[in-house]
Amino acid sequence: MKVLKFGGTSVGSVESLRNVKKIVEGCNEPVVVAVSALGGITDKLLKTASLAMAGDEAYLQSMDEIVSRHHSVVENLISEGSERDALISRIDALFSELNSIYHGVFLIRDLSEKTSNTIVSYGERISSDICSVMIDGAVLHDSREFIKTVRKQGRNLLATETTNELIKAEFAGLGKSEQISLVPGFISRDINSGEVTNLGRGGSDYTASIIAAALDADSLEIWTDVDGFMTADPRIIKTAYTIDSLTYLEAMELCNFGAKVVYPPTIYPACAKNIPILIKNTFRPEVKGTVIS
Ligand code: ASP
Ligand code: MG
């Protein structure tokens, strides 16, 4: 089996979502698919929260934009019918909760870390539901039930052992009753308090790597909007080119020195289990990409 992760730009438009559908449905082995929020949505959720906290009624307009963006994707992606209606009503129920949370932030002028983490979680909760309806045969799982974090020195760190056990139990049916499991990236839950947490900005890559390691996947594919790791930033260095292969250590160094292709903690779980990481371009799936092994 393998684990695939699709980033924000890959799930950001109807066209790119159609590529995602084709890529996933074309896999001829069991897969777990992790998805980010629709491109730009996490930033927008946070910006809306800041507006509400500042007592600026513009948060309402911003919230409306978030809702219409998702509605428009669903309407253009999924054909009319009862499945689409059910999806829209699930999404609208989540938006109604989110609206109440923003209203609370607006009234109290307070945005705690707990509130902010809850707010951003809606991005992946909604995008994963959309993707699970779009992809034939996909079964949606809730990452908050098996990706657990523990609070240490003011940070939310992965509770590795519990998480690994929970992942094995959650995906026991993969390859048997189920061929495609779909999960929201990024989001998690505190192992003690049960509060919604996350793995940090860009954390969907890490979700995918954690699952790949726990399930001893044959490979981890990170589907993004570039052809792979490059020798330099092509916007600055015109002669930059894509690198075919890297070692885990080289990839870790590139990430830590600012290559934005993958979230740095992603490399570790895959490396520890010797699982190759493939960086692929959703918009040019025919391109070989970069292999990290
Ligand atoms: N949606 C989250 C972010 O924008 C996580 C991710 O995309 O990896 O940071
Ligand atoms: Mg990313």
Image (cartoon, helix red, strand yellow):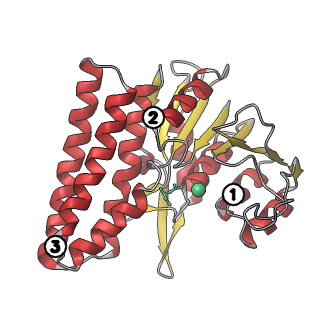
Above-or-below relation of 23 to 70? above
Instruction: State yes or no: discs 2 and 1 in contact (Cβ < 8 Å).
Output: no
Q: Secondary structure beneath disc 1?
A: loop
Residue in front for this viewpoint, 265 or 291: 291
Instruction: State yes or no: discs 1 and 3 in contact (Cβ < 8 Å).
Output: no
> Residue 251 at x, y = what percent?
80, 60
Above-or-below relation of 179 to 88? above
Disc 2 under 8 Å from ligand 1? The reply is no
Residue type at mark 1 is Val
Residue in front for this viewpoint, 280 or 187: 280
Inspect this view and state whether residue 41 appears: yes
> Residue 273 at x, y = what percent?
77, 48
Write the residue at 16% across / 73% down: 106
Measure the alpha-carbon separation of dots 3 and 2.
33 Å
- Tag shown at residue 14: 2
Front position among marks 3 and 2: 2
Tell me if mark 2 has few (under 14), some (14-19) or many (20+) residues whose alpha carbon lies within 10 angstroms of its own.
some
Residue type at mark 2 is Val
> Residue 207 at x, y = what percent?
56, 51
Compared across the picture, whether 39 is left or right of 55 comes to right
Q: What residue is disc 1 on?
A: 261
Task: Give the mark nearer the N terminus: 1 vs 3.
Answer: 3
Task: Give the mark nearer the N terminus: 2 vs 1.
Answer: 2
Above-or-below relation of 167 to 75? below
Write the residue at 26% across / 60% down: 62
Q: Secondary structure beneath disc 2?
A: helix
- Tag shown at residue 106: 3
Measure the alpha-carbon separation of dots 2 and 1.
23 Å
Residue in front for this viewpoint, 167 or 183: 183
